[in-house]
Amino acid sequence: MNEITSKEFREFNFSEGEMLLINKPYKWTSFDVVGKIRNAFKPIKLKVGHAGTLDPLATGLLIICTGKLTKKIDEFQAQQKEYTGTMILGACTPSYDMETEVNETFETSHISDNLLHENTKQFIGDLDQLPPVHSAVKVGGERLYLKARRGENVELKTRKVSISQFEITRIELPEIEFRVVCSKGTYIRSLVYDFGRAIDNGAYLSALCRTKSGNYNVTDSFGVMELVNHIRALKEQDKLK
């Protein structure tokens, strides 16, 4: 198995299989990244996939697999993830992040640092978590966010997730910065929303970055266009394989 990062460009064998570490840009979908890389290979047809979706408003580590290595996507996707982010206290949004407008507000003057730190503890361990209504989860064969945009009410089912670390790293109300280490399938937006409810308040996600997936770190990743331009250069030099 090959792995490339922005620290080095070496000889590639994309058809045999490469595992690529990408720093997903803000407002790009994970599919946007896959599509951009896949298009860079044209007219060569090559399998390209990602191991773990990131929301468009999130940034950070996205593992991309090519060629025969796409068969291992599920293995990479199952790895533990680490995120850093920022939540805004005193308000909620229907999407639990900045995709939708604030629809509920709360007073925050009574909130103490101790209250915040103490309430992270109840989210450590195995949890039953509801996905956000504005999410890519499929219900009846259709993405939830499509139903939400039409104003449809959907009965959501909880999913089992595991959180091993949840810590507050900076408090400057209404902003709070945090770090989370969690299992595959954990919705950080839902964690933020539930945390707000746990302190009898409201909270929504304003920034999120996936910093690690398994043993792989966003500090070792490279930009989408950095890779795309390198692929194009290899094609021009007839060195693509």
Image: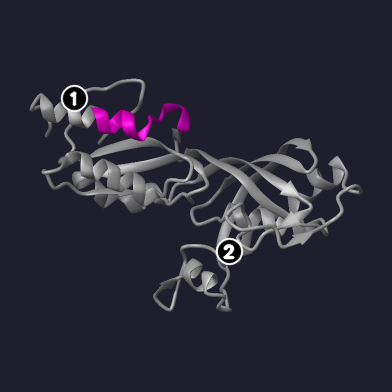
Secondary element type, mark 1: loop
Residue behind mark 1: 11
Disc 1 marks a residue whose amino acid type is Glu
Secondary element type, mark 2: loop
- The residues colored magenta run 218-229
- Horizontal side, residue 53 vs residue 150: left or right: left
* Residue in view at x 23 percent, y 45 percent: 38
The vertical placement of 236 against 41, above or below, is: above
Q: Nearer the viewer, mark 2 or mark 1?
A: 2
Helix, strand or loop for the magenta stretch, by majority: helix
- Horizontal side, residue 89 vs residue 17: left or right: right
Query: How crowded is the residue under tag 2: few (<14 C-alpha within 10 Å), some, or many (20+)?
Result: many
Q: Dividing the picture into quarters, in which one does residue 165 lie?
A: top right
* Residue in view at x 16 percent, y 34 percent: 13
Q: Earlier in the sequence, mark 2 or mark 1?
A: 1
Q: Which mark is residue 145?
A: none
Residue behind mark 2: 132
Q: Is residue 126 magenta?
A: no
- Horizontal side, residue 148 vs residue 220: left or right: right
Query: How crowded is the residue under tag 1: few (<14 C-alpha within 10 Å), some, or many (20+)?
Result: few
Per the model, the C-alpha gap separating discs 2 and 1 is: 42 Å
Task: Please name whichever residue, 12 or 183, is drawn nearer the observer in this view of the structure.
Answer: 12
Disc 2 marks a residue whose amino acid type is Pro
